[in-house]
Amino acid sequence: MEFGHFQTGTDPFRPMSEINVTPLVDVTLVLLIVFIITAPLLTYAIKLELPDARSSPAGAPPAAINLSIAANGALYWNGTAIGSNTLEGRLSQAALQSPQPELHLRADRAARYEFVVQVMSSAQQAGIRHIGFVTDPNARTAHPRPAQR
């Protein structure tokens, strides 16, 4: 009984039983030549003598204003409670400072979107150019679903 049609003879339709390693050797030699040529290029460095230069340290970063919005819409300017009518005046004063301070906006998760938009609109009208949103990087990413009624 023949297994897989591997028999000795001159049948032209029988499968080839030897592995042809010639293409494998050809590819290996080509890769070897490529690596031999490119390896010295990877370690080549241009030798330069750079001039010494002294400069003054960069100026201090501009001050930041921490504006917090509580869940009920209460505003806190650097931890001090303020009213919404006081906010516009303080934002206008901050916009006139040079360099202009950054506004770091912290909003409670339960704060209504309307409160956040009102503060952003007031800051834009006052001329504040840099607003950043402060988030908690350790907070859970999944929000609980609201209770079904």
Image: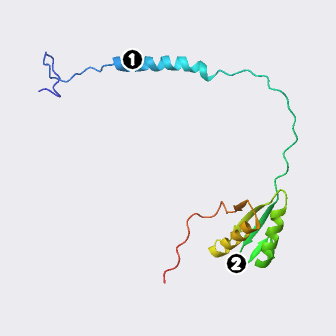
First in sequence: mark 2 or mark 1?
A: 1
Q: Residue at x 68, y 76 (%)?
A: 71
- Are the residues flagged by discs 2 and 1 in contact, CB closer than 8 Å? no
Closer to the eye: label 2 or 1: 2
Q: Residue at x 55, y 65 (%)?
A: 142
Residue toward you, 95 or 9: 95
Q: Residue at x 61, y 23 (%)?
A: 42
> Viewed as shown, does residue 132 lie left or right of 145?
right
Which mark, residue 73? 2
Residue ID for mark 1? 26
Which mark, residue 139? none
> Viewed as shown, does residue 61 lie left or right of 24?
right
What kind of colouring is applied to the model shown? rainbow
- Asked where in the image residue 62 lies, by quadrant, the reply is bottom right
Q: Position of residue 57 (x, y in %)?
A: 86, 43
Q: Secondary structure at mark 2?
A: loop
Q: Residue furthest bottom?
A: 149
Residue toward you, 23 or 100: 100
- Answer few, some or many: residues within 10 Å of disc 2's Cα (few below 14, many 20 plus, some between 14 and 19): some
Q: Secondary structure at mark 1?
A: helix
Q: Position of residue 29 (x, y in %)?
A: 44, 17
Whether residue 112 is situated above or below residue 11 in the rendered picture? below
Residue toward you, 106 or 120: 120
